[in-house]
Amino acid sequence: MPDQPEFNLHCPLPSSPTDVIQLGHGDGGQLTQNLLQQIIYPRFANPELDRAHDSALLQLPGNALAFTTDSYVVNPLVFPGGDIGKLAVYGTVNDLLMAGALPRYLSCSLIMEEGLPIATLTQIVDSMAAAAHETGVQIVTGDTKVVDKGHGDGLYINTAGIGERCTDRLIAPQSICAGDQIILSADIGRHGLAIMAQREGLSFEAPLSSDCAALTGPVSALLAADIELHCLRDLTRGGLATALVELAETSGLGISVEQNSIAISDAVGGGCELLGMDPLYLANEGCFIAFVAKADAEIALQLLRQHAVSASSCIIGEVSDSNSGARLQTSIGSERQLRRMMGQPLPRIC
Ligand code: MG
């Protein structure tokens, strides 16, 4: 048998890795379609998204709506207690709840960096889907874009949310009244310190984990109860101190809180001492304050304590008509005027 002629074939195009995001995933062509069909649509599946139209068409009841948006740039993408996907759903859901609205629909925009492992993306989309399921929201519209390597940091997410207002009360800073009791739903500082520890490779004796959580249970209970609930605020960037300062300014009233009533876990307390951080300014992602009329404060506490995320709720202070900003009664008996945070102690926390 004669020798077969030898062919030396070379593919003129380098083969593209299939396990990472490529620029082509953002070009609107076949790769984009593959990404949507294989990763996004099956996980977020709902009739509106499945329509694959340019906009979601929503049927909403006659109630007033709340509408909010937030972008998430947290670094690292996955951290103890959560990841950027969970944060992007819970964060927007919580902002709707803070306005007295029950979250219904979310949008989801993914800005991916070339080279992002598909496995990481899948893990984060799975996490978003689970968080949406848990909180009863549907992700009905979205977008995917890819930026070249070095021009992003793995993944950024934007979510916008629509919620249905379920009370005629205006739950807002303008509704705060002198005499209102201020309830804090949980111990503070866990998210900020957990991110810092993860990023800097620090480890503490007591384990640190983000408090990243949906506030749907406790806030729905407060909204459903016939109580004089005046304002809600989640304690994200800037922490408890910044929220108190902002609310004192917006309402034109005085806020006074007792340092001894503000719960701080041993892990956060120890970490802050070591790093010279003030837990009052650390970010939280599953923690809020409620302003409730004095007569209803006890009922509110009982309702909040029935939910795991707010089981340790307690009254930390009250509102006066003094227009004196926000003040902390310290554990050594002095008074400290709280100020807005100046410069981030830690960037890219959410
Ligand atoms: Mg907020």
Image (tube, rainbow, N blue to C red):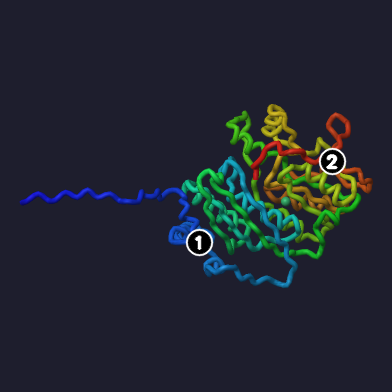
CB contact under 8 Å: marks 2 and 1: no
The residue type indicated by label 1 comes to Tyr
What quarter of the picture does the C terminus occupy?
top right
Amino acid bearing label 2: Val
Q: Is mark 2 within 8 Å of ligand 1?
A: no
Q: CA distance from mark 2 to mark 1?
A: 47 Å
Nearest the camera: 39 or 33?
33
Residue 7 disc label: none
Q: Position of residue 114 (x, y in %)?
A: 49, 48
Please state if 329 lies on the left or on the right of 60 as rendered: right
Q: Position of residue 174 (x, y in %)?
A: 85, 56
Q: Which residue is mark 1?
A: 41
Residue 220 at x, y percent in the picture? 72, 58
Secondary-structure class at tag 2: strand
Comparing 222 with 106, the one in front is 106
* 235, above or below 105, in the image: above
Q: Is residue 224 above or below residue 61?
A: above
Give x and y (percent) for residue 59. 65, 72
Judged from the image, the secondary structure of the residue bearing numbered disc 1 is: helix
- For label 2, the crowd category at 10 Å Cα-Cα, with few meaning under 14, some 14 to 19 and many 20 or more, is many
Q: Residue at 54% across / 57% down in the picture?
A: 144
Q: Which residue is mark 2?
A: 257
For label 1, the crowd category at 10 Å Cα-Cα, with few meaning under 14, some 14 to 19 and many 20 or more, is some
